[in-house]
Image (tube, grey):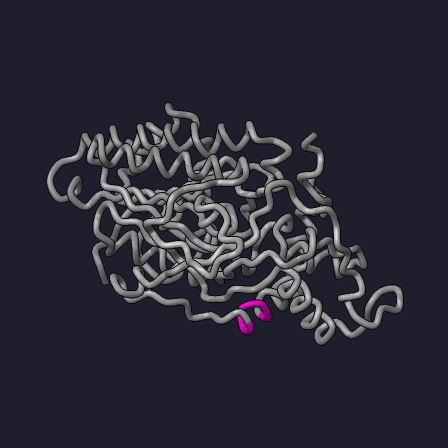
Amino acid sequence: MRNKKTILITGGAGFIGSALIRYIIKNTKHTVVNVDKLTYSGNLQSLESIEVSKYYIFEQVDICNENELLRIFRKNQPDIVMHLAAESHVDRSIDSPGDFVQTNIVGTFTLLEQSKNFWQSLKGSKKENFRFLYVSTDEVYGDLAGTSNFFTEESACRPSSPYSASKASSDHLVRAWHRTYDLPVLITHCSNNYGPYQFPEKLIPHVILNALVGKNLPVYGDGKQIRDWLYVDDHVYALINIALNAKVGETYNIGGNNELQNIEVVKKVCSILDELVPNKLNGMSSFSDLITYVKDRPGHDVRYAINASKINKDLGWEPQEDFESGIRKTVEWYLNNKAWYENIQNGSYQLERLGVNYK
């Protein structure tokens, strides 16, 4: 067992952050400090299984609040910062780009400044072993339409949406704080995550929950947009490996090796639901009857695909979950956790389509 560490995780009540915290608390003796503002997609129910652990600390704090961050750093003395807090839905960024600039850019800047100041105050091995891991997205690279190429760690940033532009901006900030101040940073870019506890504005849970109540399943454009699908637990294993073992200054792409068209994903979910939910509403023969093609998202990238050979070569990581097994686990989880998603739907989000009020 490696030396016990204190890990400060921002956005730990979100989808990926909560999966990361659940794994660390259940499988290690590291202490986790979860810093989360608890916006609409932050859900402490996702952490109920570990919330009483003596190794878990929760701070409801906005990462733009420098005084509160200063207090948290001084109080908890973290060894690693894993920065996942972000506004993350492309459609929502089209409606409210200012929120994405504030959280994803200003928030990252504020966290970098407090991390730098804290790190500079350290001495000896505590300073030498400090790490700042920024979790970004493959969307910063833009569109691979019309090619058979893959994103590599050397690919240029060519963001298409307010969301991806805000994440790319933070990529540049993190690299600049490393180059200018020597802050010991690491950066990751992941492909599309899926799995249990995902907020239902995202494609897979959106399809599952709409289908169960007989609502239309909106598919943008022709549905042939291609994404690489990464099971969230595989992403978590990669992040922990990088945080503990990677060389300072490195960037890693994390992908699932599961390139699929959006329409293929939707039809696969419908097929599993047909098998697991034989009694359908309104006399449907298949949940796929609900598929409805709608106007495409403005600026919609056609294809993302990641080359994850670097992380495999350097750290020995590769995804363990293929899409067939991962998507079945995901559908089964939503079918068995009605209370979790009903609590979300009782709030402000009612499975409506976002990103259509941009004119």
Q: Using the image as rendered, state which of residue 16 and residue 257 is in the foreground.
A: 257
Identify which residue, 320 or 154, lies in the foreground.
Answer: 154
Q: Residue at x 45, y 51 (%)?
A: 52
Q: Kindly indicate the quadrant of the structure image that contains residue 348.
A: top right
The residue that appears at 55% across and 30% down in the rendered structure is 99
Query: Picture coordinates of residue 197 (x, y %)?
Result: 57, 55
Residue 105 in the image: x percent, y percent?
A: 43, 31
Q: Is residue 273 left or right of residue 30?
A: right
Residue shown at 41%/42% (left/top)? 157
Give the quarter of the figure containing the N terminus: bottom left
Residue 215 shows up from this direction: yes
Q: How many marks?
A: 0
In the image, 95: left or right of 133? right
Residue 161 vertical placement versus 303 (above, below): above
Furthest residue in direction front, as rendered: 146
Task: Look at the image and tell me whether residue 21 can be seen.
Answer: no
Q: Is residue 217 magenta?
A: no
Q: Main secondary structure of the magenta part?
A: helix
Give the x, y percent position of residue 182. 20, 35
For image coordinates 55% across by 27% down, the residue present is 98
Q: Is residue 318 left or right of residue 5?
A: right
When the figure is inspected, residue 128 is found, relative to residue 224, above or below; the finding is: above
Residue farthest right in this picture: 283
For residue 31, side relative to residue 183 (left or right): right
Q: Quadrant of residue 318?
A: bottom left
- The C terminus lies in quadrant: top right
User: Which sits in the foreground, 40 or 1?
Assistant: 40
Image quarter of residue 291 = bottom right
Q: Which residues are magenta?
A: 324-328
Q: Nearer the viewer, residue 305 or 92?
A: 305
* Residue 263 position (above or below residue 132): below
Which residue is farthest left? 124
